[in-house]
Amino acid sequence: MQAQTEAPPDVESKDSFFIQSIVARARATTKDITSEMFEEKSGYEVKKYKLRVLYVPPEPAIASPDEGRIQGVARVGSGPSLHP
Protein backbone atom coordinates (compact mmCIF):
# COMPACT_ATOMS: atom_id res chain seq x y z
CA MET A 1 0.00 0.00 0.00
CA GLN A 2 1.03 3.56 -0.57
CA ALA A 3 -0.24 6.70 1.16
CA GLN A 4 -2.15 9.20 -0.93
CA THR A 5 -0.44 12.51 -1.50
CA GLU A 6 -3.73 14.44 -1.28
CA ALA A 7 -7.20 13.72 0.03
CA PRO A 8 -10.06 13.15 -2.43
CA PRO A 9 -11.90 16.42 -3.18
CA ASP A 10 -15.16 15.33 -1.55
CA VAL A 11 -13.45 13.33 1.26
CA GLU A 12 -16.06 10.65 0.61
CA SER A 13 -14.34 7.49 -0.49
CA LYS A 14 -15.72 4.37 -2.02
CA ASP A 15 -12.39 2.60 -1.53
CA SER A 16 -12.51 -0.66 0.37
CA PHE A 17 -10.56 -3.81 1.09
CA PHE A 18 -12.13 -7.19 0.41
CA ILE A 19 -10.91 -9.89 2.80
CA GLN A 20 -11.64 -13.60 2.57
CA SER A 21 -10.77 -16.21 5.17
CA ILE A 22 -11.12 -19.95 5.65
CA VAL A 23 -10.27 -22.40 8.40
CA ALA A 24 -7.40 -24.50 7.08
CA ARG A 25 -6.58 -27.93 8.38
CA ALA A 26 -4.32 -28.29 11.41
CA ARG A 27 -0.60 -27.84 10.75
CA ALA A 28 -1.20 -26.40 7.28
CA THR A 29 1.70 -24.35 5.93
CA THR A 30 1.60 -21.42 3.54
CA LYS A 31 2.44 -23.86 0.73
CA ASP A 32 -0.75 -25.79 1.53
CA ILE A 33 -2.99 -22.72 1.07
CA THR A 34 -4.18 -22.25 -2.53
CA SER A 35 -6.48 -19.80 -4.27
CA GLU A 36 -8.82 -22.68 -5.11
CA MET A 37 -9.58 -23.07 -1.39
CA PHE A 38 -11.39 -19.71 -1.49
CA GLU A 39 -13.81 -20.71 -4.25
CA GLU A 40 -17.41 -21.57 -3.34
CA LYS A 41 -17.12 -25.11 -4.72
CA SER A 42 -13.99 -25.90 -2.66
CA GLY A 43 -15.91 -27.31 0.29
CA TYR A 44 -14.36 -24.79 2.67
CA GLU A 45 -16.56 -22.28 4.45
CA VAL A 46 -15.35 -18.99 3.00
CA LYS A 47 -15.89 -15.93 5.20
CA LYS A 48 -15.99 -12.63 3.34
CA TYR A 49 -15.45 -9.18 4.82
CA LYS A 50 -15.49 -5.74 3.23
CA LEU A 51 -13.61 -2.99 5.05
CA ARG A 52 -14.39 0.57 4.02
CA VAL A 53 -11.61 3.13 3.84
CA LEU A 54 -12.02 6.19 6.03
CA TYR A 55 -9.86 9.24 5.44
CA VAL A 56 -8.84 11.06 8.61
CA PRO A 57 -7.13 14.44 8.35
CA PRO A 58 -3.72 14.74 10.03
CA GLU A 59 -3.63 15.95 13.61
CA PRO A 60 -2.73 19.62 14.09
CA ALA A 61 0.71 20.31 15.56
CA ILE A 62 1.30 22.62 18.51
CA ALA A 63 4.42 23.94 20.20
CA SER A 64 5.13 22.35 23.58
CA PRO A 65 5.56 25.08 26.21
CA ASP A 66 7.89 22.82 28.23
CA GLU A 67 10.37 21.97 25.53
CA GLY A 68 9.61 24.42 22.72
CA ARG A 69 9.17 21.67 20.14
CA ILE A 70 6.30 20.66 17.91
CA GLN A 71 4.10 17.79 19.06
CA GLY A 72 0.99 16.16 17.62
CA VAL A 73 -2.31 16.59 19.44
CA ALA A 74 -4.15 13.39 20.34
CA ARG A 75 -7.89 13.16 19.85
CA VAL A 76 -9.84 12.22 22.93
CA GLY A 77 -12.83 9.93 22.56
CA SER A 78 -12.46 9.48 18.82
CA GLY A 79 -12.89 5.71 19.00
CA PRO A 80 -10.53 2.78 18.82
CA SER A 81 -7.20 3.19 17.10
CA LEU A 82 -5.65 0.66 14.75
CA HIS A 83 -2.18 2.06 15.37
CA PRO A 84 0.04 0.72 18.16
Image (tube, rainbow, N blue to C red):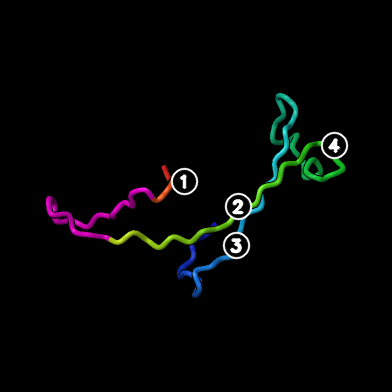
Q: Residue at x 79, y 40 (%)?
A: 37
| Residue at the spot of label 4 | 43
Residue 39, quarter of picture:
top right
Q: Earlier in the sequence, mark 1 or mark 4?
A: 4
Q: Is residue 70 left or right of residue 57?
A: left
CB contact under 8 Å: marks 3 and 2:
no
Residue at 85% over, 36% down: 43
Spatial CA distance of label 1 from label 4 is: 33 Å
Q: In the picture shown, does residue 31 fall above or below 78?
A: above
> How far is the residue under mark 4 from the one under mark 3?
30 Å
Instruction: Examine the rendered structure and indicate whether residue 50 appears above or below residue 46.
Output: below
Q: Residues within 10 Å of mark 3 (few under 14, many from 20)?
A: few
**Crowd tier of the residue under label 2, counting other residues whose Cα lies within 10 Å: few below 14, some 14–19, many 20 or above:** few
Q: Which mark is residue 15?
A: 3
Mark 1 element type = loop
Task: Specify whether residue 71 is painted magenta.
Answer: yes
Q: Residues within 10 Å of mark 1 (few under 14, many from 20)?
A: few
Q: Residues within 10 Å of mark 4 (few under 14, many from 20)?
A: few
In magenta stretch: residue 70: yes
Numbered badge on residue 28: none
In three-dimensional space, the C-alpha distance between marks 3 and 1, rounded to whole angstroms, equals 18 Å
Please indicate whether residue 58 sits to the left or right of residue 10 in the image.
Answer: left
In the rendered image, the quadrant that contains the N terminus is: bottom right
Element marked by disc 2: strand
Give the quarter of the image for residue 44: top right
Q: Earlier in the sequence, mark 3 or mark 2?
A: 3
Label at residue 51: 2
Residue 61 position in % (x across, y down)? 26, 60
Q: Earlier in the sequence, mark 3 or mark 1?
A: 3
Magenta segment range? 61-77
Q: Position of residue 57 (x, y in %)?
A: 40, 63
